[in-house]
Image: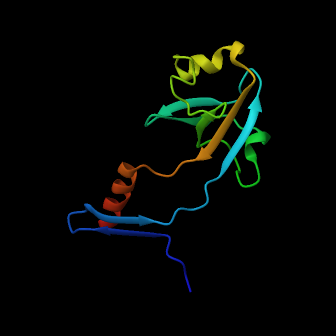
Amino acid sequence: MANIYCVIIINKFGSLIYHYEERAQVYEATSSYQYPLPFKFKEYNETYEVIFGETDTVKGKHIAQSVGFTLTKINNRPPTLEATNGRNLQEFLDDCQNYPLTLTFSKSGPSMNEKITIASTLHS
C-alpha cells in the first residue's frame, strides 16, 4: 500500500482550501569553520540560504550538497542581529575576528506562499 505524504485541496478558482504535509525527517549538519568561509549566502524570506560553495563537512550522512541549505544556527544561536553582535550576517562572517564558528545547516521546505502557488498551478 502506498503512503500519502501530502494532501492539497483547492477550489475551482485555484485557491488553497486545505493543506496537509507529512513532515519528513529534517536533515541537519553542524560543523566548525575557520576563516575564510567556503560558502556564499543570500538572504531569502528572513533566512540565509547557501547559494555557492560546497564542502565535505556539510555533506554529512544524508546531505548531498550544501547549496540550497539554510543557515539555522551560529554558535548554537539563531542567526539574528543578537547572535551577530548587531551586524549584518555577511559583515559578521567576513570579519576574521569572529572565527572559529560553529554553523548548523538544514534543508528548508517551501514557504506557505510557495505552497499556495504550487497548489494553484495544479488546478489548471
- Of the 4 image quadrants, the one containing the C terminus is bottom left
In the picture provided, is 55 more to the left or to the right than 84?
right
User: What residue is rendered at 56% in x and 17% in y?
Assistant: 85
User: What residue is rendered at 56% in x and 23% in y?
Assistant: 89
In the picture provided, is 66 more to the left or to the right than 83?
right
The residue lying toward the viewer, choosing from 96 and 119, is 96
User: What residue is rendered at 34% in x and 56% in y?
Assistant: 116
- Of the 4 image quadrants, the one containing the N terminus is bottom right
Q: Position of residue 6 (x, y in %)?
A: 45, 68
User: What residue is rendered at 79% in x and 41% in y?
Assistant: 56
Residue sticking out furthest to the left: 13
Q: Position of residue 48 (x, y in %)?
A: 54, 34
Q: Position of residue 17 (x, y in %)?
A: 27, 65
Q: Is residue 62 above or below residue 87?
A: below
In the picture provided, is 57 more to the left or to the right than 113?
right
Q: Position of residue 10 (x, y in %)?
A: 28, 67
The quadrant where residue 104 appears = top right
Q: Is residue 25 above or below residue 70?
A: below
What's the colour scheme?
Answer: rainbow
Figure disc tally: 0
